[in-house]
Image (spheres, helix red, strand yellow):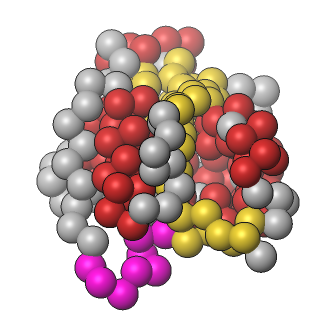
Amino acid sequence: MKQLVIATKNAGKVEEFRTMFANYNIEVKSLLDFEQPIGDIVEDGDSFEENAIIKAEAIAEKFQIPVAADDSGLEIDALGGAPGIYSARYAGEDKNDQKNLEKVLHELKSTPAEERTARFVCAVAVARPGLSTFVKRGTCEGTIAEAPRGNEGFGYDPIFIPLHSNRTMAEHSSTEKNSISHRKQAILKIEEWIQEHF
Ligand SMILES: O=P(O)(O)OP(=O)(O)OP(=O)(O)OC[C@H]1O[C@@H](n2cnc3c(O)ncnc32)[C@H](O)[C@@H]1O
Ligand SMILES: [Mg+2]
């Protein structure tokens, strides 16, 4: 089975990539699989795309192999697009999912249902030694719930209700999430490369 390295340390992302790439007969490896510790890559870009490129190129350069990376987050219209590219550290440097979603609910406590529109965004970059890097964006539209619900998924899933549903993303099975998610939409846009390369 062919392998693709995804430059992430986020176990939730890894699980989703693993499931979705199995459909292409590709085995996913992540930075959690390397024996030598890989230091944190500084994500100092101004967009999801820039950060995904930074992560993919850093690891492709280091190991001289093709690498994909994911930069993602939650954009909330009533907060001017926040937390956006700062989603992972919204409530502090410790990157705590529970604290992050509580902060969102607190910020939105006086925002009525019809103004709680939001979207998950995912940029997937593919870096290849000696070739140019490319990046694609997928999105998933929805609204922010009044309170967290559900135990599936990770991150902000318990407070995100995708369009045309009345359940939070954390109340969707992994199969359901992987058919509508921002990550799925981004992967569909790199499908041509996947099919040519593997
Ligand atoms: O940089 P890597 O190592 O990939 O891992 P990370 O967790 O730091 O990932 P990001 O920098 O891309 O930050 C993504 C943030 O958005 C959240 N997020 C991303 N995708 C999500 C999803 O599918 N469901 C819920 N939350 C998500 C996630 O929990 C983080 O808080
Ligand atoms: Mg990160």
Q: Nearer the viewer, residue 2 or 105?
A: 2
Q: Outermost residue, front direction?
A: 130
Picture coordinates of residue 190, whole percent (x, y): 69, 37
Give the dominant element type of the magenta stretch: helix, strand or loop.
Answer: loop
Instruction: Report the number of numbered marks.
Output: 0
Percent position of residue 81, x then y: 37, 18
Quarter occupied by the N terminus:
bottom right
Q: Nearer the viewer, residue 150 or 54?
A: 54
**Lateral position of residue 96 relative to residue 191, left or right:** left
Q: Is residue 127 left or right of residue 169?
A: left
In the displayed structure, does residue 74 sit left or right of residue 110?
right
- Residue 21 against residue 78 in the figure, above or below: below
Q: Quadrant of residue 167?
A: top right
Using the rendered view, name the quadrant where residue 186 is placed: top right
> On screen, 5 above or below 81?
below
**What residue lies at 51% left-to-right and 23% top-to-bottom?**
118
x, y (%) of residue 159? 51, 42
143 in magenta: no
The image shows residue 150, relative to residue 120, as above or below, that is below
The residue sitting at the bottom extreme is: 35
Q: Is residue 159 in view from this perspective?
A: no
Q: Residue 164 is drawn in which quadrant?
A: top right
The one nearer the camera, 192 or 139, is: 192
Q: Which residues are magenta?
A: 30-37
Tell me, yes or no, if residue 197 can be seen here. Answer: yes
